[in-house]
Image: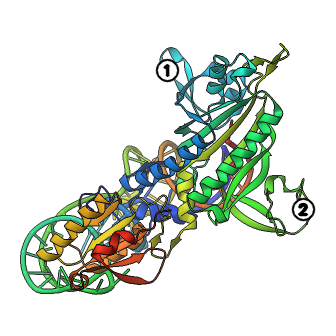
Amino acid sequence: MLQSKLFYKTNKNKSALADSVSHDLLVRAGYIDQLMAGVYSFMPLGFRVLKNIEDIIRKNMEAIGGQELLLPVLQPKENWQKTGRWETLDILFKVKGSGDKEYAMGPTHEEVVTPLAKKMVFSYRDLPFSVFQIQTKFRDELRAKSGILRTREFLMKDLYSFHATQADFDAYYEKLAKVYTNIFKEVGIGKITHRTLASGGSFSKYSDEFQTITNAGEDIIYICKKCSTSINKEIKAEYPICPKCKANEFEEKKSIEVGNIFPLGTGFSKPFDLKFTDKDATDKPVLMGCYGIGLGRLMGAIVEASHDEKGIIWPKSVAPFLVHLIQLGTDKKITTSAQKLYKSLQMEHLEVLYDDRVKTPGEKFAESDLLGIPYRVVISEKTLAKNSVEVKERSKNSVKLVKISQLHKIFNYQ
RNA sequence: CGGGGUGUAGUGCAACGGUAGCACGAAUCGUUUGGGACGAUUUAGUCCGAGUUCGAAUCUCGGCACCCCGACCA
C-alpha cells in the first residue's frame, strides 16, 4: 500500500478520552473514527487489524470443530419473550417495523441458534456439534465508554455448542478454554490475560472470563499469588481462599474482559423445547454452552497493553502491515530503488506500507512510531551508499544496517 | 438510570456582557530534507431554539450532543 494513497489522517493533537489510551492512539493514528457515543468506524488501517484478529479467531474455532455460519441481526420479538429476555434485558435494542411489529437487534444469538438447532437435532446421533459466527452485535449500553472498549455496536465472535451429556459438555468447555488461552497468546496478550472465575449472570451459576490486565479495565480481579488462579471481584466474597490451592493471598488488578465462556445447561433448550432422543429411547434436553470474544474490544486491549509514549506497538500477528518502508529523500535514484524494493517485498508476500510521501524525516519517523508497524525499513541516500537499508523493530531501540539483497531474511514470521 | 462537566475553524485550546484569537492541519510559493523544519500569503468557527440586554461565545430557560463518576453489564 502506498501511504500517499492510504485513506487516513494522523493528528498531532491529543484527543483522548480520559480513561482510554487506546482510544487516543487509535483515533490519532487514523485506525478508527467515532461516529457517535459507542459507535465507531474502522478505517482501512483499523479494519486490517480487525481482520487479522478475525482470522486468528476463526482458525482457532475451526480447529475445535466449530462450523461457521451467519445468523440474522434482526430477530422476532416472540423468541425473546419465550426466554423472558424481551422484558428483562435492558441493553436490548428494540426496533419497530411496519404495522408496529417489533423486532430485536441481536445482542447475542441464543434466541436464534436454539430454535435453529431444534430443526437439526433429533437423536443423540446429531450431537455434539458447535457453530459460530463473527458478526456485528448491538447492545444499548446505558453508558458507552473507554473508546472502543465498550461500544453499542461491535463485532463479536460467538460460538454455541450442543451436547447430549454433561461429561461431553465439560470436556468441550475445557477444550474451548484452552483454545481461548491460545487465541490471546497469538494476539500478543497471553501473559497478561487470565482465565477468571466469574458469575454467570442470569444463565448459569458461574462462567469463565478471560481478563486482560490493563488500567483502562472496568473489572477488578484477584489473582492468587501462589497458583495464579484468578477470581472476579463480583464473586470474590464466595472465595475467601483460593479454590484451587487454598492459599489466601491475592493480588488485586484492574482488567478488561476480552472473552467469556458460559455453561448454559438447559437454560435455552428448555424454553425452546430443544431435545433429543437418547440411546434409551427417552427424550432429553440438549445441554448448551456459549462462548464469546469481542473483536474490537480485543483490538483496544492489545493497544492498551502494547504502546509507548510515541504510539502503538502492534504484535506481528495482528499488525496492519508487517513492514513500514520509508523513503527519505526525493532523488530519482532513491525513488527508483525504493519502488524496486517495495515491489520485491510484495513478491515475497510481505505486507508493506510504503511511505512514498514528500515529507521531512522527522515527520515520517514520528508517524511511523505512532502507527506502530513492527518493522521499519528506511531507504535513503545514506543507506544506498552501502547497498543497504536501515531496519528497526518498533518494539526495540536498536537499528541495524542490512544489505538489500539480504533483507527478506530479516523478517521473522512465527 | 442518578450525579457532575463540556459544546468556539478539520483538530486541540483562548476570549471581563462590548471588533472572536492562538497552535496544529489544509492550500500556494520559495528555502529545506536522518526525529513532527523555516518564511510569506491564504483558508475556515461561536451546537440548535427562545429569552434578558443598547449589545450575548459569555447571563437565563428549553432542546440536542459528547465526556466523566456511579449504578448496570453474556
Residue A45's quadrant in the figure?
bottom left
Q: Return the residue at label 1.
A: A97
The amino acid type, in three-letter code, at marker 2 is Cys
The N terminus of chain A: image quadrant? bottom left
- Residue, x 43% and y 75% (percent of image)? A393
Dot 1 crowding, Cα within 10 Å, few <14, some 14–19, many 20+: few
Q: Is residue A318 above or below residue A389?
A: above
Q: Earlier in the sequence, mark 2 or mark 1?
A: 1
Q: Is residue A268 above or below residue A232?
A: above
Q: What percent of the width, then of the height, locates residue A296?
A: 52, 51
- On screen, residue A394 versus residue A143, left or right, reads left
Q: Return the residue at label 2.
A: A245
Q: Secondary structure at mark 1?
A: loop
- Residue, x 63% and y 61% (percent of image)? A190
- On screen, residue A39 versus residue B42, left or right, reads right
Dot 2 crowding, Cα within 10 Å, few <14, some 14–19, many 20+: few
Mark 1 belongs to which subunit? A
Residue B44's quadrant in the figure?
bottom left
